[in-house]
Image (cartoon, rainbow, N blue to C red):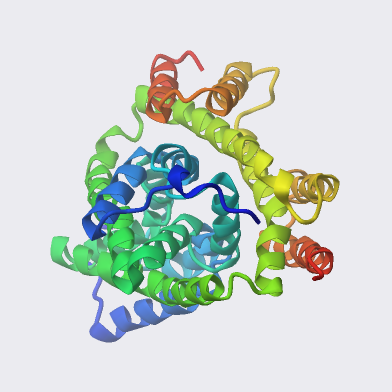
Amino acid sequence: MQNPPATQRTQPQSLTDLFVSFTVLALQGFGGVLAVAQRELVEHKRWMTNEEFVEEWAVAQIMPGPNIINLCIMIGGRYFGLRGALAALAGMLLVPMLIVLLLALAYAQFATHPGVIGALRGMGAVAAGLIVATGLKLFPALKKNALGLAACIGFGVLCFVAVALLRWPLAYVLLGLGSIACVMTYRRLAP
Amino acid sequence: MNEALHLAWSDWFQLFTHYLSLSLLAVGGAITTAPDMHRYLVEQQGWLSDSQFNASIAIAQAAPGPNVLFVALMGWHVGLNAGGLLPALFGVLVSMLGVMLPSSSLTYFTSRWSHANRELRAVRAFKQGMAPIVIALLIATGWILASAHGAPVQDWPLWLTTVVTTVIVWRTRLHLLWLLAAGGLLGWFGLV
């Protein structure tokens, strides 16, 4: 895969930069942080390209543990080693954890308020759209894929049908479809 | 729960090791192990009530930040049941450390290795081969979230909100928080 010109990319300046960036990122993520991660890391900060984001995301997805946490550990570790991974992780968890605990204290009072229930429903509908849109935005990253665009679309459709429509367990889909796709790619990458 | 729960050190240690063992099973996110947490915390040990369990997940999903914080909330509630704020904070620490330590360490070392060997044919094949599947998974996740809405005929305002959001985020650079705020307001006033 070709790298874009170096001028297009920047990198985190310091551990503090990592911590603050991931705190800001996490605090924007209602109902999941992924959509915000693509927006912030690729479009805003330009720490990575769409292609790199998809590749890192593939690793973050296949490893056990929360995907977005895995991603922040990988990015922090890439630039500043273990300290970077810990700074990014702390940014992702510390402030959001305080907020969640405060919300838990308040929740008992407001859980049955119709406005609150409605607002959560509305935000849930928006969050679903954010995630679909992130997938659509990453789609052009497949154009340079060694599998070829046609095969990529084929695997994509199969995966969507299996997970969204048939509701098969994620682990089977990742193992089954994933290993076929990886083997095919491996053969196409033949030197 | 009115009666204070008594948790000995050995119980806390058991909680910790239980989360340690779940950590590496959490492929696809910690939420995939939620059914087992329910079995262990609510049914087997009785450390957590059903409503506390559900509230932990609901609050973490509604709040900003990664959804894995539902684990912190479960630890928090176990601690509250065991006597108050200090045990609650201890519960947060024990459960988050347990659930994060194994998977995060594995990810850290794997990503170091795969970055050092990024020119390796197998590593490139893995990353590129997984790309279409990972992208489709995102769209599938959005689809599953949206199917929590009722049938389109009846709940069309919710579906419309999702579709409009998708198009706006895909095609414009409008800040995501505006969209979430708009969704929240529409919901607050009962419009969706």
- Residue A146 in percent (x, y) is at 76, 56
Residue A72, quarter of the rendered image = bottom left
Q: Residue at x 49, y 45 (%)?
A: A34
> In the figure, B157 relative to B101: above or below?
above
Residue closest to the eye, A28 or B118: B118
Q: Is residue A143 above or below residue A71?
A: above
Quadrant (top left/top right/bottom left/bottom right) for the N terminus of chain A? bottom right
**Hey, which quadrant is residue A55 in on the image?**
bottom right
Taking A115 as reference, is A182 left or right? right
Q: How many marks?
A: 0
At 53% from the left and 27% from the top, the residue drawn is B169
> Is residue B165 toward the left or the right of residue B95 in the image?
right
Counting from the top left corner in percent of width and height, residue B106 is at 48, 76
Q: Residue at x 26, y 69 (%)?
A: B93
Percent position of residue A169, x then y: 70, 59
Looking at the image, residue B14 lies above or below residue A95: below
**Front-most of residues A52 and B147:** A52
Residue A169 visible in image: no
Residue B121: tell me if it is visible.
Answer: yes
**Placement of the C terminus of chain A among the 4 image quadrants:** bottom right
Whole-percent x and y of residue A38? 49, 43
